[in-house]
Image: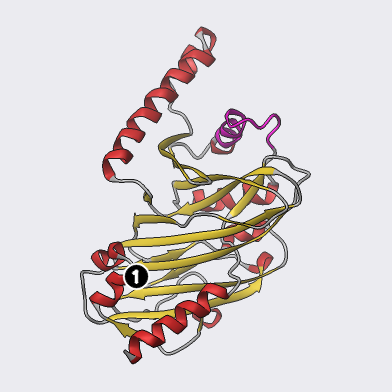
Amino acid sequence: MRKVFLIMILFLAFAVEKVYADRGSIPFRPDVKIFEPIQRAMIAWNGREEILLLSTDLRASDSCKVLEVIPLPSEPIVKKGDVEVFKKATALINRKLREHYARTLGKVKAEEMRKPPAGEITFHKKIGAHDISVTHVLNNVGFIQWVEKYLKDAGVENPIIPEAMKTVINEYLEEGFTWFVFDVVELDENPKTNEAIQYRFKTDFLFYPVKITRTEEGYTSIELLVLTSRLLSKFTGIPIEQVELRHEPVSISSVELRSLSEDMDELLGHREDIKLRIWQIRGKLSTFKEDLIAR
């Protein structure tokens, strides 16, 4: 009971903390300012796969749609939705994209049609206020133009991707990141808490995107609930000195973890000695040059 009570205290404390976003934001209107969204994150990693659970609070200076960009080391499975929906949506979107290109490009562009596109959408689903697309980069050259076309298709008359965002995206591409999540949400002046979205993807290191936020201004405080089967000591991205351990790690059982998340309990193999702790990363957004990578 004492252990469960301690975990409840940690979760309650985490729930009220302001945790700022680790996504890049592109407003559909360049004159609109996006205020730093609150982001609540939970990570489970078993050495081969990661589950990343996110929920954000967003606010804009005026009513506007916003495209949030999340880089990932591999293709994620995005909840809510089952595997069959994922497969059917993938096939449907790819077929419709091919039909769309055939109609819009016409005979004049027939030769260009034989060239592979810079990117392809492998998953598309509307989850509550989120309109999520998982995008696989097929060709680094021209991917920014592909994103601009994506924005035009989404209704943006004259899409403008900030230069800082282009720079960061190119850095991810050069580092071998070929998967991006595009999440479109509608914002206004009132803070909005969106549904939690779960991403599950293969990775041989614990990963959380941080440097994507250097496209924004100001300071940030990131707090992460971290679940692993063992404690981690090798930090090859953000140095370990910048990752503050908020408390002594606690061990939780399979039953306790299952009460929080059945998916995370399954990912971690129903172990009886899972390590749970809160990490905090703070600093000026423009100073983040690396992501959180740990083993």
Instruction: Kindly report the secondary structure that dominates the magenta region of the rendered protein.
Output: helix
User: Who is closer to the viewer here, 87 or 196?
Assistant: 196
93 lies above or below 175: above
Residue at x-position 54% and y-position 54% = 194
Q: Quadrant of residue 207?
A: bottom left
Report which quarter residue 134 is drawn in.
top left
Question: Start and end of the magenta stretch?
Answer: 145-159
Q: Could one spot residue 291 in this view of the protein?
A: no
* Residue 233 % position (x, y): 39, 81
Magenta stretch contains residue 243: no
Instruction: From the image, tell me which residue sits under label 1.
Output: 260
Given the current orientation, which residue lies at the most extreme top position? Answer: 107
The residue furthest right is 31
| Residue 2 visible in this rendered orientation of the protein | yes
Colouring: secondary structure
- Report x, y in % for residue 102: 46, 15
What is the secondary structure assignment of the residue under circle 1? helix
Q: Residue at x 33, y 30 (%)?
A: 91
Q: Is 240 positioned to the left or the right of 288 in the image?
A: left
Vertical arrangement, residue 128 with respect to residue 214, above or below: above
The N terminus lies in quadrant: bottom left
User: Toward the viewer: 187 or 72?
Assistant: 187
- Judging depth in this view, the residue of 209 and 240 nearest the camera is 209
Where residue 206 sits: x, y (%)?
39, 67
Q: Quadrant of residue 285?
A: bottom right
Q: Who is closer to the viewer here, 25 or 251? A: 251
The amino acid pointed to by label 1 is: Leu
Q: Residue at x 40, y 56 (%)?
A: 198
188 sits left or right of 88 in the view: right
* Quadrant assignment for the C terminus: bottom left
